[in-house]
Image (spheres, helix red, strand yellow):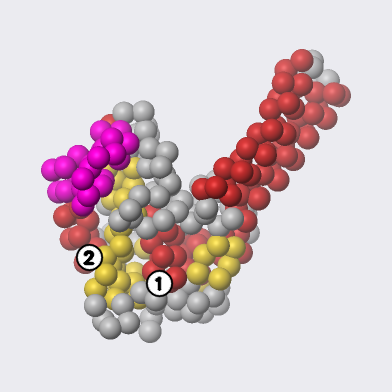
Amino acid sequence: MSNGLSYSGYCNNCKKEHSLPSEKAIEVCGLLMQKFAAYEHIDYLNEQTDPRLSTHHLYGNVGGKMFGVLICKDASGKEVVLKAFSSTYNGIWNVEGWVPHLASEKDFMQIVEKGNSEIHPLTDRIKTLEKNSDGWKLKTEQRKIVSQKTLNELFDLYEVFNFKKDKRTLKNAFNLKKGIPNGTGDCCAPKLLNYAALNNLTPISIAEFYWGKPSPSGDKVEGNFYSSCTNKCQPLLGFMLCGIEK
Ligand SMILES: [Zn+2]
Ligand SMILES: [Zn+2]
């Protein structure tokens, strides 16, 4: 692609790569950035009453964030613009006007709390044991198993649809043999594409940009566009984009 951006993934079913162009969505992202700059709020369509949704947080502790736009066509051919922020916004999972998170917040927090209630006593016990003693090794191993089990339960909450109306758990949609990284499914592209698939919208263009203070490593800068991440999104997008070429 001429602008160097890529939103694509290899599909194991079709044995080929599916991809979406970005040019049209880049224009819409530009308008979104203007709104962010003017209103300093992500709820600019409403009364901007919730201070938690101010963009000021993106320059403070919360740090900068990825935002994405997906342009789709509905069944009648009308264009529909979808917007997403990655993960949660300042701790808020779902904001009106933005596509929802893939998992249910209530179910997610229940699993986290259950996991913590098993992990914290083990951590306290481990602190009292001599490092590398048999007891220490045993409890450390137990804690590892519990935290892995919790992560697996969290991943099972994420289901994704594609444009052939096939549904998979995130783990089954992920096409790399190595383990699925933490945070997979929380980026803009999976949220946007899943919403489109569920609502009979056909995607035509996607783009993602960064807003806020530069990322700690300095690899992300406000106003710049970035391709889908290679470790979490690209292995999902082959499945998720399947069926877009109608
Ligand atoms: Zn990603
Ligand atoms: Zn395919």
Q: Residue at x 86, y 24 (%)?
A: 134
Disc 1 to disc 2: CB gap under 8 Å: no
Quarter of the picture containing the C terminus is bottom left
* Res 10 visible: no
Residue at the disc numbered 1:
199
Classify 192 as above or below 52.
Answer: below
Tell me where the magenta segment starts and ends, as one range.
33-58
* Res 194 visible: yes
Quick one: 76 or 10, which is closer to the camera? 76
Q: Is residue 206 magenta?
A: no
Q: Quadrant of residue 141?
A: top right
Q: Amino acid at mark 2?
A: Glu
User: What SS does tag 2 mark?
Assistant: helix
Residue 70 pos. (x, y %):
31, 64
Residue at the disc numbered 2:
23
Tell me if mark 2 has few (under 14), some (14-19) or many (20+) residues whose alpha carbon lies within 10 angstroms of its own.
Answer: some
Looking at the image, tell me whether mark 1 or mark 2 is earlier in sequence order.
Answer: 2
Tell me if mark 1 has few (under 14), some (14-19) or many (20+) residues whose alpha carbon lies within 10 angstroms of its own.
Answer: few
Classify 156 as above or below 161.
Answer: above
